[in-house]
Amino acid sequence: MSELNLTHSNGNKVKLTTPDTLSGDKTFKLPGADGSSGQFLKTDGNGALSFATVATNTSNVKATRTSISDISGVSYFDATLPSNCFKVELSALNVSPVGSGYLAFRVGTSGGIQTGGSYYKFCQNLIGASQNGVFETNNLVYLNGYIGGGSADVCTTQLTFMKCGTGERWTMVSTTMEEGTTSSQITVAHPQNGSTPITTVRFYIHNGGNFDSGDISWTCWSTT
């Protein structure tokens, strides 16, 4: 096996050797200048060597949190999605309507909040009861269509809205319980927005009424 010995003035050597097996002649051309600190020696696949900088992933995830301690007297709350948003979470605690009304969910695009009659597909399921689930195509998504809805009914909701794959496809899942009862509901939904970017997520009372009480917070995750 051929080798090249580079001898230090103190007599120690640095040795370069050929590989254990070699199918043919190989030529490596060294770069004409030294690289910068931290760079590495790379090949173009044809024997030409050069110094290059290690690529780093500059994509970072940013969490944007919005909290309102009291939504009494408010008819809705909108979360404006930041650029490159891929996930939204809602926490709503001790929420009740003025009069009657169900908790509902909608999204908005550059054209405003979407209220088309077939814009949302969703399924409601009551937990811990013999009630069958129901699939609907509607102009909103009910978050507690089987529970609550009365002026004295207090509910807590945890909701996740997440981008699915590429493009502007999103899915939503929420769990809502009625305080002081064994009633709870799971809702799974997705908007029919096609390729139109979603810019807003709305939490509100389905009949346009106001909230009587409740605490709410949104957290949006996006890439930067």
Image: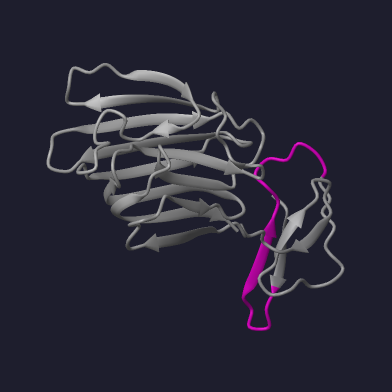
Residue 187 appears at what percent x and percent y?
35, 31
Q: Residue at x 47, y 46 (%)?
A: 202
Q: Residue at x 67, y 34 (%)?
A: 195
Q: Quadrant of the C terminus?
A: bottom right
Q: Magenta stretch: residue 22 in it?
A: yes
Left or right of 2, for residue 91 = left
Q: Residue 49 in the image: x percent, y percent?
A: 80, 57
Q: Is residue 81 left or right of residue 20?
A: left
Point out the residue furthest to the front here: 99
Magenta residues, dominant SS class: loop
Q: Determine if the magenta segment contains residue 143.
A: no
Residue ID at (37%, 49%): 210
Is 98 in front, or is 176? 98
18 left or right, relative to 81 = right
Q: How many marks?
A: 0
Extreme residue toward the right, this view: 32
> Residue 58, image x and y in percent?
62, 60
Instruction: Tell me the residue at 27%/16% (across/down).
Output: 132
Image-based side of 120 in relation to 158, left or right = right
Q: Which residues are magenta?
A: 7-25
